[in-house]
Image (cartoon, grey):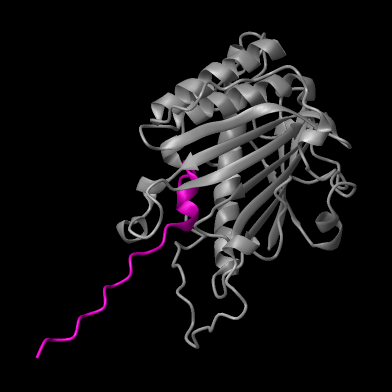
Amino acid sequence: MLLKEYRICMPLTVEEYRIGQLYMISKHSHEQSDRGEGVEVVQNEPFDDPVHGNGQLTEKRVYLNSKLPSWARAVVPKIFYVTEKAWNYYPYTITEYTCSFLPKFSIHIETKYEDNKGCNDNIFDSESSEAKDLEREVCFIDIACDEIPERYYKESEDPKNFKSEKTGRGLLKEGWRDYHQPIMCSYKLVTVKFEVWGLQTRVEQFVHKVVRDILLIGHRQAFAWVDEWYDMTMDEVREFERATQEATNKKIGVFPPAISISDISLPSSTRSAPSSAPSTPLSTDAPEFLSVPKDRPRKKSAPETLTLPDPSQKYPPRSLASMFSPTKPSMPSLPKQE
């Protein structure tokens, strides 16, 4: 398990970013989706937590089948996806990614937002026991000056070149976090688990590289699109979210019932989420229905493993498929017929 804390400053207030975050996620998901690939929204409804209060529960499926190698598509279900669950109690959120094809793989993200420039070193200590017990690396992400994968660079989304007409903010130069007002920080505590012997450290480091690139691009877009969402109310951005999600589902070829985003909070008894964690908890072992029975005889040879790219290289973060795309193995030769 590898734990890192990312801190991403924005030239916004926490209250402003509440709208911008919802707008950015919906628009970004729609842009990155195509026929048979992309993000399907399965559930988006109010949720009540006994500790954090009223929030929003969202479940999505990120379809990745065509991005797998041919040999893998032959052994996995025809429709292959990563499940994303998010509990939004803004300014505190929990997001979890799991994959049925890789039951030992998971990503768990806790996020808090504060109106400062990333100076709170104890922001997660009251929420996560792991944050207290495990050593974590703090990584600052600069939306203006950090390098992004070349294929995702857009001049119109570069904070060094962009200036908002509605807010007058922009043209961020090196060191902007030291003097810009307003300023807020998105604190993200990211836990990556890939419990496969011989590959755990390498894969977890690689996944963190992908996560970092995704966070950098997403926050750059949230600011670059500020003139599109700045005047929106919460009702208006929820309507935009609903319409965009339905369009995205149709774009990838999924036609579920119309998504309903209700303003009526559900009673807490309708969900069984713990007070400070998702209802699908992370654990060191896979769920029982995915676990290998203890009495099953095990082979003495080493299990098949996946060979992934060198985490030190740069890869585009367009989808989570790059986290676990294995190299095609050589086919065994057949014995000659006598």
133 relative position to 32: left or right: right
Report the magenta residues as a range. Answer: 315-338
The residue drawn where x is 42% and y is 57% is 325
Position of residue 46 measured from the top left corner of the image (x, y, whole percent):
73, 26
Q: Quadrant of the N terminus?
A: bottom right
Chief secondary structure of the magenta portion: loop
Identify the residue at image location x=90%, y=47%: 126
Query: Looking at the image, which residue sits at the far left?
Result: 338
- Residue under the image location 40 percent in, 26 percent down: 251
The percent position of residue 190, horizontal first and vertical second, equals 69, 50
268 versus 337 height, above or below: above
Q: Taking the image as drawn, is residue 250 in sight?
A: yes
Residue at left offset 38%, top offset 30%: 253
Frontmost residue, 323 versus 260: 260
Q: Looking at the picture, does residue 72 appear above or below residue 151?
A: below
205 left or right, relative to 80? right
Q: Which picture quadrant has residue 203?
A: bottom right
Residue 330 part of the magenta-drawn span: yes
How many numbered markers are drawn?
0
* As drawn, 83 above or below 144: below
Residue 174: x and y in percent read 65, 34
Compared across the picture, whether 5 is left or right of 72 comes to: right
Residue 199 included in the magenta stretch of the image = no
Task: Give the image location of residue 317, x and y in percent.
Answer: 49, 44
